[in-house]
Amino acid sequence: MSLTPSLRSVYTRLFFAVLAGGSVLALDSLQRLPTPEVAAAVWMNPAMPDVRTLQETARGGIPMPAGAAAAHASSMLVMPEENPAALTIFWFSGERESGPLVQIAASQFDRATQQWSLPRFVVNRHEMGKQLGYGVRRLGNPVAWTDGKGQIHLFVVATGWGGWAAARILHVRQTRTGNGLQQLAFEPVQVLPLSWLWNTSFLVRNAPLPLADGGMVLPVHFELGIKYPVALRFDREGTFKGMVRISQRPYLLQPALIMQSPHEWLAVMRDGRPNGKIGAASTIDGGQHWRDLPDLALDNPDAAVAAVGMAPGQMLLAHNSSPGSRARLDLSQSSDGRHWTRVKTLEHGASEDEFSYPAMVWADSSLWISYTVDRQRIAWQRFAVGPAHPGAKP
Amino acid sequence: MSATGWGWVTPLLSSDSPLLPTAWVMQWALRLSWSVVLAWLGARVVGYWSQRKPLQWGLALGLACWSWIPGPYAPVHWLGLAFQAPSLVTVLLCVVNLRERLFSARISNRSAEPTPRVPLALAALGVLAGWALLLDTFAWLPVELYQWGFSPAASALVLLVVLVPWVIGRGERSAGITVWVAPLAILLFVVLRLPTGNLWDAVLDPWLWIALHVVAVRHCSVRG
């Protein structure tokens, strides 16, 4: 059977189109690294402390930068054992939240003196804009992580036109060796490509979940009109490896990831609705798929939470527990992630007071909790397992 | 064939190993792409009032050069802040239009003619893809479409889709060079990974998507 000239032409064109598609597929595939293994989380503290016996050993305030009237959204980073500092804390500080003078500040807790150092600014929006080649309008919510080579990375909310809803996540990496506070300097890696709509409106707040391969999973959220949580994966060098939605419920934001086993994780989330409860979702395949869980039986006054899986069956949650107010900050514990009991009230003030945006890490055999006080300063508390021991200076 | 025989397909569909451009490549590409778009915009705006080539050349070159000034005195500082980088398709369309506008003896008055079938089909595909991506941005789709743009299969499949109008168009001569803009953009994306490493950002940006709506509406009104 012979083909008509026009039909033959269509087949010829089809052949060349398929050939072009195949060539592009081959060229694209050849450039890529192998797909990473299924993500496996690692415990924050393999020594399995009994979190029910936590005793406060020290508390106080982090020194603020001179002239800074506002401070918010702290993130703590555990430093290596050989480092003179046990922790580095980052937060955003300036004349007011979303102010043009806001920068990312940092301070370190010295192991010898048991005190926080005087802070210094380590990320400036003008400097970042110069290196990116375009403007950064405002900065906020730093989240710190150390990669497999020991370099510190920060994930920072960097807004375009339109405030927080037009925010993007700026990934910056330490430029020099040495983790002393005076040596800390950062350069942009990239603005993470997370959305087609001019790459708005993704924000970061909570700490990453460390993985066995040296990488991590960073919880972020979308918040333009509606809100939904997303998990981003990074390899041990801090290279972006993809994103997965945690939930499609349009009011959950600022997820905090809790390890229950290497491949089973829980996400607990702020509820953007008034009088909401803490939202929850879980994965059993290392974050490849997530499913919604019923809300926890814990009130959430549209406020950020922090959570960690310390060891098998030992999970901790720092959260504002009174409806309609951030005046009370509690620490709760759970063995299954569904049922939580209060361990301590970290702060309890008058209704107009605010103790919010907690962050938690385990370092030097202690649990450290930092949080914002009245959007003006950052406070901290340290807990040890068992009876309190003297020696720590606030 | 057993299910395990399809194991080779998994990495092709996987979006877990995205290839992203380096920071300095992105920075150079940002300036270059916005300088091309601004040059086109300048020539186009002048073209409304005057067909004098030196005037069009002058404004196009002036805007293009202005884009390379560092800091907040350049439009790229503000355009990047608001819109990040334009798509490769937008940049290539601007190049095609600039070439026609600055080097041709006469600009055809296309707004009075219906859009040829093949470009119209591509515009319709762009409009549909944009709506799907917008819905995906707000998590209103059951699949994660933007994330799929990081996979190796995305480039090949989208290339095949944008070639479909050409395959069935039987050499429609009036289609012109614009038919090849999207395929060329995909080829450039596979090599350069610009502007973000995600295929969707290379083939369609929100401004282009809005412009494609205008093309479709204008075609309907001219025909109607």
Image (spheres, grey):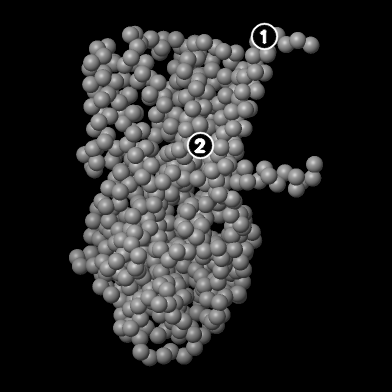
Helix, strand or loop at label 2? It is: helix
From the top left corner, tell me how far across and down residue A219 is, in percent: 49, 58
Picture layout, residue A118 above or below residue A282: below
Tell me whether the residue at label 1 lies in contact with that at label 2, contact meaning CB atoms closer than 8 angstroms.
Answer: no
Q: Which residue is mark 1?
A: A5
Asked which quadrant contains residue B118, the reply is top right
Amino acid under label 2? Val
From the top left corner, tell me how far across and down residue A390 is, in percent: 38, 91
Q: Is residue A192 left or right of residue A135?
A: right
Residue B190, labelled with which disc?
Answer: 2
The C terminus of chain A, quarter of image: bottom left
Count of residue discs: 2
Q: Chain of mark 1?
A: A
The crowding category of the residue bearing disc 2, from other C-alpha atoms within 10 Å (few below 14, some 14 to 19, many at least 20), is many
Picture layout, residue A55 above or below residue A106: below
Picture layout, residue B210 above or below residue A329: above
- Residue at x 64% of width, y 59% of height: A285
